[in-house]
Amino acid sequence: MRVAILAHEKFPDRAKTAVGVLRYGDQEVVAVLDRDQAGTTVGDHLPDVGADDVPVVEGIDDVPDIDALLIGIAPIGGGFDESWRPDVRGAIERGADVVSGLHYFLNEDEELSRLADEHGVTLDDVRRPPDDLTVAEGIARDLDAEIVLTVGTDCSTGKMTASLELVEAAREAGLDAGFIPTGQTGIMIAGWGIPIDRTISDFTNGAVERMLVEAADDHDYLIVEGQGSIVHPAYSAVTCGILHGAMPDALVLCHAAGRDRIHGYESFPIPDPGELAELYVDLAEAVAPTELLGGALNTYRMDEVEAATAVEAYVDALGAPAVDPVRDGAGALVERF
């Protein structure tokens, strides 16, 4: 499927969905829309994702034929920026589907919904959870699969990236591993999943459990994409719901190198990673026994020497193995499965 990705004024640093699809998706990305970076290429910003020649363009009129437009950014609160409307409208009028991970549902937008009907295209709101979710039964630990959950010191620390790298490393090691997507980017990449941060709170644990039950017969190892952080002042509820719904056998703690404050909530410090790892284990073990498998460190924008030093310091802080999964892969963690 040929796609363009909308990432206006955010690419690449604040366009997590765009970067995730570029790095891990199986779609053919033919353009990225960012009016601030128009005239460059993806390779100018992300030389390691294998999309060096993909152009960054001003708007939809500069995009070649596509099957779908993906909205590759999600502002805090998941709202729809009205400055995107001409590009979304233009994509629909050209016969392209639109895939969105916003809390704002495109299908409930009167103009866009009408246009989609007129042009016979689909508006795919991936952040809309199933209507028949219910509470957990507490059976995840009874499944015939080892469950590994990525957790974080903060939002945007690389939990999805670490999860996908763990799956890839496990498969390279000859293990049968599957990915359990819980956020909009993971869902766009995998083509299935439940958006946990849009799920009714009482049903969060049950939603995670449902996905594990669905996948357990197909894989020996299930890698669950974590969300948020248990110490985040805004998003801790979703983190706890995933933790207790998944009943993981092991945890991987994800951290962004050099970050010592919650992003966007700078009055809240991030606890020492070693202490935070113990907190996660203690909280998980109230439901099912678990262990810290190791850590994943995001060293984006560091050079090789700085990154290696940061990983060594993270190992010392955790008292457990750690990797930068993008630079080094996750093989060292998979060896501990």
Image (cartoon, rainbow, N blue to C red):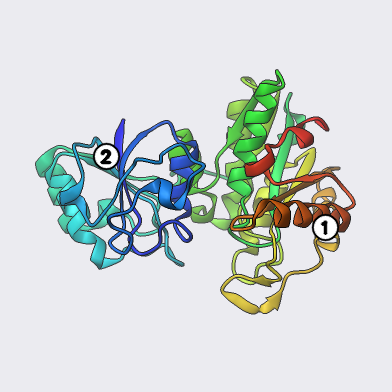
Task: Give, as a three-letter code, the residue at label 1.
Answer: Ala
Give the residue displayed 72% in from the left and 53% down from the top.
305
Kindly check if marks 1 and 2 are in contact, taking CB atoms under 8 A apart as contact: no
Residue that carries the numbered disc 2 in the rendered image = 68
Residue 281 can be seen, yes or no: yes
> Which mark is nearer the camera, 1 or 2?
1
Q: State the residue lying farthest toward the bottom.
A: 267
**In the structure shown, which secondary structural element does the residue marked by tag 1 occupy?**
helix
Q: CA distance from mark 1 to mark 2?
A: 43 Å
Q: Quadrant location of the N terminus?
A: top left
Q: Residues within 10 Å of mark 2 (few under 14, many from 20)?
A: many
Nearest the eye: 137 or 287: 287
In the picture of the structure, the residue carrying the numbered disc 1 is 313
The percent position of residue 48, horizontal first and vertical second, equals 52, 42
Q: Is residue 45 left or right of residue 182?
A: left
How many marks can you see?
2
**Coordinates of residue 328 in the picture (x, y in percent):** 69, 40
